[in-house]
Image (spheres, rainbow, N blue to C red):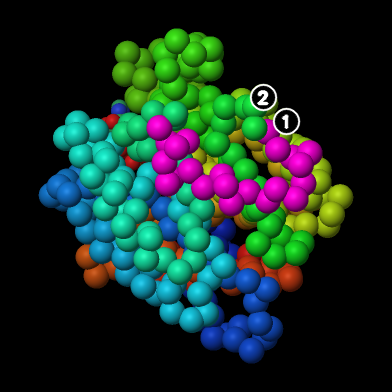
Amino acid sequence: MLQKPHDTSRCPETAGRAMDLELSDHAGYLRPCFTFGIIADVQYMDQDDNSNYQKTRTRYYRHGLDLLRSAIDEWNKEPVPSFILQLGDIIDGFNAQQLTSHLSLQTVLGEIEKSKAPFHHVWGNHEFYNFSRDYLKTSKLCTKQLEDETVPSLRHDGEDFYAYHFSPFPKFRFVIIDTYDLSVLGRETAKEKYQYSLKILKEKNQNEDLDDSDFPEIQFVQFNGGLSQEQLSWLNKVLTYSDENHEKVVVASHVPIHPQATDSAGYAWNYSAILSILHSHTCVVCCLSGHDHDGGYFLDSHEIHHIILEGIIETPPGSHAFGTMHVFEDRMILNGRGRTFSRVISY
Ligand SMILES: Nc1ncnc2c1ncn2[C@@H]1O[C@H](COP(=O)(O)OP(=O)(O)O)[C@@H](O)[C@H]1O
């Protein structure tokens, strides 16, 4: 993935490892309203370690399963989190070439079944390297049945994107969005959305290899995607509901939304349209994503915390990369493990 010129603004002094927290500093402060787990980019495959595309990082394909298992073991200890957010790319795209997609999916789902807390799954590019969108909809990676159905006006059953919302605790809402709604991955080539996505991508990216970035809009690569106008309108409706009901909202996606949260080209094609919607509401406190395995953080102009979770796939044996978020009325405290930063997210 093309790296952007180094941008130090994504790591303000308030957000670096220097700010690592001992959760015990806050223990006894208040009992959290609820807690939830986060994990990203497991990219499991039963194959030997190898490097990433740029040959700058090692990818530990097999070991990811052990890390997923040990994260679940930890979450299964009391008090069990209310739910786990799996931020996408649960198995690696190389499975498709080796015809092991279904076997690898079964293997990771076998671990996930041992979780006492329900998983909410987000879909990333590696889901689409392995499976069609139609297959994913019928698979256990589709957790839309966990949607909050108490607000019928927010349903969007007719639309072909994987997005839903749920409220694990009064006054808090989570919105899972589909950052491959506009994408050339996962959709049949004859479908209108595929053709439209390909047109946008080719207009912005003149390279023969559409995974290769092109300046100035480096996010227009095949391994990223964006939100359709229909999904943006739905997101706007959910956030309007949350504003009116004085809720705090966490948005979860695979592809990061804010360019300044990442040093890489890995952010949403139409990030500015998404940010415009988020910024036109008061309810959004935090955006969680995966995709950039180095992780990242940015506090934007509207006090929205953008957190990119470090990827399991590039986490060496002996370390880890997951977090448990403790949610209070006025803040969330991310208790990060291994490479994952601990943070206080005040709102
Ligand atoms: N800079 C690049 N130029 C061309 N292809 C790339 C580049 N970076 C990644 N790719 C290709 O894009 C696909 C997704 O890359 P990968 O690094 O596996 O994505 P992720 O960051 O989601 O793990 C792979 O097929 C990879 O070979």
Please say whether residue 264 is visible from this viewpoint: no
- Quadrant in which ligand 1 is drawn: top left
For the N terminus, the quadrant is top left
Q: What is the span of residues highlighted in magenta in the rendered image?
A: 135-156
Is residue 103 part of the magenta span, yes or no? no
Q: Secondary structure at mark 1?
A: helix
| Structural distance between the alpha carbons of marks 2 and 1 | 6 Å
Residue 25 lies, in percent from the top left, at 57, 85
Residue depicted at x 38% and y 44%: 89
Is residue 147 part of the magenta span, yes or no? yes
Residue depicted at x 35% and y 32%: 131
In the rendered image, which residue does mark 1 sit on?
A: 233
Q: Residues within 10 Å of mark 2 (few under 14, many from 20)?
A: few
Residue 235: quarter of image: top right
- The image's mark for residue 316 is none
Badge 2 vs badge 1, beta-carbon distance below 8 Å = yes
